Each structure stands twice: as structure tokens, then as C-alpha cells.
Image (spheres, rainbow, N blue to C red):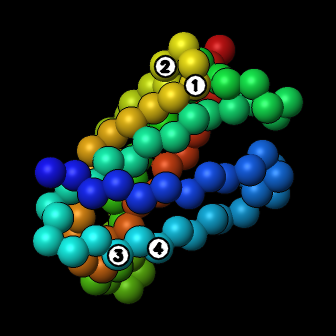
């Protein structure tokens, strides 16, 4: 079973071009479901955006990074991906607009 956490990021937060760090604690779960909606700068859902998922291993200094995959937003801008929970590991999601 997947654990679910929800945090909405505003367009302002994304436009600042800063790293947004979200911390969630899940107990006894091996995977979690990351879902969201991609919006364009004027607030409309963005279909066919590519979301690149990078796993960052914090057990090393500097951390090791491994690209684990890409998913795409649906026609309504929504996306979802199941990711494994790992101690001292983090994920970076990089979004690319279509076209």
C-alpha cells in the first residue's frame, strides 16, 4: 500500500526558481504516491509536461544522484508516480514544458 501526503505549491513558489524542500514522515510504508498538477505561468493546467525524477542519496558527501525516470502530465495537467521510501534519500522533480 502507498502512503499519501499532500502539499500544494503555488505559481509564486515555483516562479521564484528556488529549491522547495518538503519533508514527510511515513511509517511502515515501502512506497508513497506522489501526485500533483502542473500549471503554466498563467495558472492553466499544462498537459504533456515531462517530469524527470532524480533519486538523491544523502548517505554520501557530496550526495550521489541517480536519474530514475520520467513521467508525463495528463491532458488536465495531473501526474502521479509511485516512489520507494528510503532512509536518507531524497527526490528532485524537474519539470519541462512541452514543445
Which residue is tagged 3?
25
Q: Are marks 4 and 3 in contact (CB under 8 Å)?
A: yes
User: Residue drawn at (67%, 24%), measured in percent from left and top?
Assistant: 45
How far apart in space, not on screen, are marks 1 and 2 (Cα)? 5 Å
- 80 over 67 or under it: above or below: above
Q: Which mark is residue 74?
A: 2
Q: Secondary structure at mark 4?
A: loop
How far apart in space, not on screen, are marks 3 and 1 (Cα)? 27 Å
Label 1 neighbourhood size at 10 Å, few (<14), some (14-19), many (20+)? some
Report x, y in % for residue 38.
61, 34
Label 2 neighbourhood size at 10 Å, few (<14), some (14-19), many (20+)? some
Q: Which mark is residue 23?
A: 4
How far apart in space, not on screen, are marks 4 and 1 (Cα)? 24 Å
Instruction: Answer left or right for 24 relative to 87.
Output: right
Report x, y in % for residue 47.
59, 18
Q: Are marks 1 and 2 in contact (CB under 8 Å)?
A: yes
Disc nearer the start of the sequence (4/1): 4
Disc nearer the start of the sequence (3/2): 3
Report x, y in % for residue 29.
17, 64
- 46 over 66 or under it: above or below: above
How far apart in space, not on screen, are marks 3 and 2 (Cα)? 28 Å
How far apart in space, not on screen, are marks 4 and 3 (Cα)? 7 Å
Which residue is tagged 1?
77
Q: Are marks 4 and 1 in contact (CB under 8 Å)?
A: no
Q: Is residue 42 visible?
A: yes
Label 3 neighbourhood size at 10 Å, few (<14), some (14-19), many (20+)? few
Q: Secondary structure at mark 2?
A: loop
User: Residue drawn at (54%, 46%), measured in percent from left and top?
Assistant: 94
Amino acid at each position: 500500500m502507498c502512503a499519501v501526503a499532500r502539499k500544494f505549491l503555488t505559481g509564486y513558489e515555483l516562479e521564484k526558481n528556488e529549491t522547495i524542500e518538503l519533508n514527510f514522515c511515513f511509517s511502515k510504508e515501502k512506497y508513497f504516491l506522489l501526485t500533483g498538477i502542473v500549471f503554466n505561468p498563467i495558472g492553466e493546467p499544462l498537459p504533456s509536461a515531462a517530469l524527470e525524477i532524480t533519486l538523491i542519496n544523502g548517505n554520501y558527501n557530496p550526495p550521489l544522484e541517480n536519474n530514475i525516470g520520467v513521467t508525463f502530465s495528463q491532458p488536465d495537467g495531473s501526474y502521479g508516480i509511485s516512489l520507494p521510501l528510503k532512509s536518507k534519500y531524497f527526490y528532485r522533480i524537474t519539470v519541462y514544458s512541452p514543445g
